[in-house]
């Protein structure tokens, strides 16, 4: 990182000079980007550990005699276990710091998959899944929080979106691992699928220790000189670094330091300050809507949906499922590119509107053409509607729910507030994915998608009525915007 040149200080024009010197050009600071990427790599491990069971379960059943009921529990229970990590992560990040919390998440991703790799029975498999699930909860909370706090306002939307793209990258890597190791002997194949996720944790944890601590956490602990040094490295200009430090100190001094700024003292504000209650309600509602509109049902049960829409070839079903993943990951890149240019609110409105329209189309197709098993046109339109839904979700609601939640929470509540938001997200995801089959069997596939469309429409209204724009604002500005001081 280049040192700040003396010439960056503006010079006053002198009499007789031809013209005053031009102000220094605003630099493009890549350092916070690299820090956010490294922190967000933990999200790759989260996605990997959630999805690796999809292929591993086939070989585990044959090797260890694991029953279908046990496989179902092992596959789905990680969402429940992640609640433990999500709720603990806020407490840990406020006391140990954001950086050490990321290291701790990697420890869970080391121990959990390693236990499953060496497991000889169901009990150890379940214990390993629990430890990995705690790591998933930690990763969901701390990666977007660190990215939001390390980033300058000019790139916070981009950097806070990184965990979402990395989660999806981890899912795709788990599918690759399932394929690569599937040809090995049964007793080795599923073990290597889990073991492949163990090795990166050691190097990633070591790399995280080279990152700076969050300047906001340092200031909250009274380590202002260290916070200033980090801000000098992660701001676009020296003037911005000074301004960020002043704003952070103002918030910290207003909310109290250390014990006063976190924990019980801060949570008393939920009962006494309407602005704090409003922010917490927005975070919880946003995370609820993100999952209750059915995205995980489409992602996890895509082949089943398309089979009922008329796709009869298993090979084609699996190929189309891969395309869902590609479309989802690619669309997140669009959100990352536009979040700091267009703004959060426009992208969220476009996203929720597109989700509503595509779900209505999908529900109408099932209502009008139920039983049209060999109708290629119906199958093609159904596939297009599913892709439109996935793309609409990923271009806005998917990544930006995390971005918005991370940046509007007050500093003194950010760690624990993000933990509560993640808990809401994981609970809702678990309920949706574990009820989808029962839901469409009870009210038909058309009825299920109409229900999801109604929820997506409600989320559009919520965004329009309750979410102000945050693009370009510092995190400290949020205190004024939401009246949480």
Image: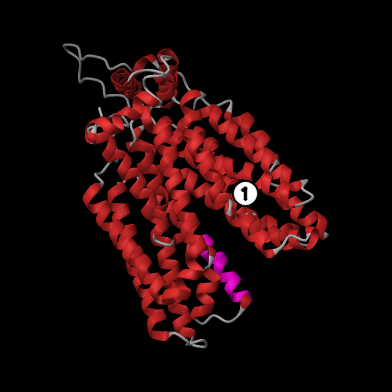
Quadrant housing residue 11: top left
| Residue 207 image offset from top left, x and y in percent | 61, 30
Please give the name of the residue rendered at 26% of the width and 53% of the height, measured from the top-left corner: 462
| Mark 1 lies on residue | 49
SS majority, magenta: helix
Q: Is residue 173 left or right of residue 195?
A: left
Q: Position of residue 306 (x, y in %)?
A: 51, 75
State the SS at label 1: helix
Q: Residue at x 59, y 26 (%)?
A: 209
Nearer to the camera, 183 or 116: 116
Q: Nearer the viewer, residue 314 or 461?
A: 461
Q: Quarter of the image containing the C terminus?
A: top left
Residue 318 lies in the magenta stretch = yes
The coloring applied to the image is secondary structure
User: Does the magenta portion include 51?
Assistant: no
Q: Which of the 4 image quarters holds residue 161?
A: top left
User: Residue at coordinates 27% horizontally, 24% vertically from top-left?
Assistant: 23
Rendered residue at 73%/52% (across/down):
122
Q: Which residues are magenta?
A: 315-326
Estimate how packed mark 1 is, as few (under 14), some (14 to 19) or many (20 or more) residues with alpha carbons within 10 Å: many
Q: Nearer the viewer, residue 5 or 134?
A: 134
* For residue 284, above or below residue 272: below
């Amino acid at each position: 990182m280049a040192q700040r040149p003396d010439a960056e200080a503006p010079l006053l024009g002198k009499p007789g000079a031809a013209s005053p010197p031009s102000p220094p050009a605003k630099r493009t600071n890549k350092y916070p980007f690299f820090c956010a990427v490294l922190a967000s790599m933990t999200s790759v491990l989260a996605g990997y550990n959630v999805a690796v069971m999809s292929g591993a379960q086939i070989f585990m059943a044959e090797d260890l005699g694991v029953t279908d009921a046990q496989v179902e529990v092992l596959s789905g229970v990680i969402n429940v276990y992640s609640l433990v990590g999500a709720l603990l992560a806020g407490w840990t990040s406020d006391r140990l710091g954001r950086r050490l919390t990321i290291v701790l998440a990697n420890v869970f991703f080391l121990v959990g998959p390693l236990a499953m790799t060496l497991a000889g029975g169901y009990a150890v498999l379940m214990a390993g899944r629990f430890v990995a699930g705690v790591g998933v909860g930690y990763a969901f909370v701390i990666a977007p929080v660190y990215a939001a706090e390390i980033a300058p306002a000019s790139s916070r939307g981009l950097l806070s979106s990184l965990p979402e793209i990395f989660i999806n990258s981890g899912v795709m890597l788990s599918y690759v691992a399932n394929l690569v190791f599937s040809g090995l002997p049964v007793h080795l194949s599923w073990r290597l699928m889990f073991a492949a996720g163990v090795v990166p944790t050691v190097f990633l944890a070591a790399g995280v220790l080279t990152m700076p601590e969050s300047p906001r956490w340092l200031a909250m602990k009274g380590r202002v000189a260290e916070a200033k040094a980090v801000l000098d490295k992660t701001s676009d200009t020296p003037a911005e670094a000074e301004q960020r430090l002043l704003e952070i100190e103002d918030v910290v001094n207003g909310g109290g330091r250390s014990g006063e700024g976190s924990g019980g003292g801060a949570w008393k504000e939920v009962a006494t300050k309407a602005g704090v209650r409003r922010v917490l309600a927005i975070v919880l509602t946003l995370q609820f809507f993100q999952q209750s509109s059915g995205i995980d049902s489409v992602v996890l049960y895509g082949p089943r949906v398309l089979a009922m829409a008329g796709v009869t070839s298993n090979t084609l079903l699996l190929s189309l499922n891969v395309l869902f993943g590609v479309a989802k990951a690619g669309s997140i890149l669009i959100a990352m590119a536009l979040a700091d240019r267009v703004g959060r609110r426009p992208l969220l409105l476009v996203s929720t509107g597109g989700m509503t329209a595509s779900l209505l189309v999908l529900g109408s197709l099932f209502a009008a053409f139920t039983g049209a098993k060999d109708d290629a046109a119906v199958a093609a339109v159904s596939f297009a509607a599913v892709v439109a839904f996935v793309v609409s979700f990923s271009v806005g609601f998917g990544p930006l729910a995390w971005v918005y939640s991370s940046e509007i929470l007050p500093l003194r509540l950010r760690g624990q507030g993000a933990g509560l938001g993640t808990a809401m997200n994981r609970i809702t995801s678990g309920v949706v994915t574990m009820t989808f089959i029962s839901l469409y069997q009870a009210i038909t596939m058309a009825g299920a998608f109409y229900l999801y469309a109604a929820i997506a429409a409600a989320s559009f209204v919520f965004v329009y009525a309750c979410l102000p724009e945050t693009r370009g604002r510092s995190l400290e500005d949020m205190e004024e915007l939401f009246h949480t001081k």
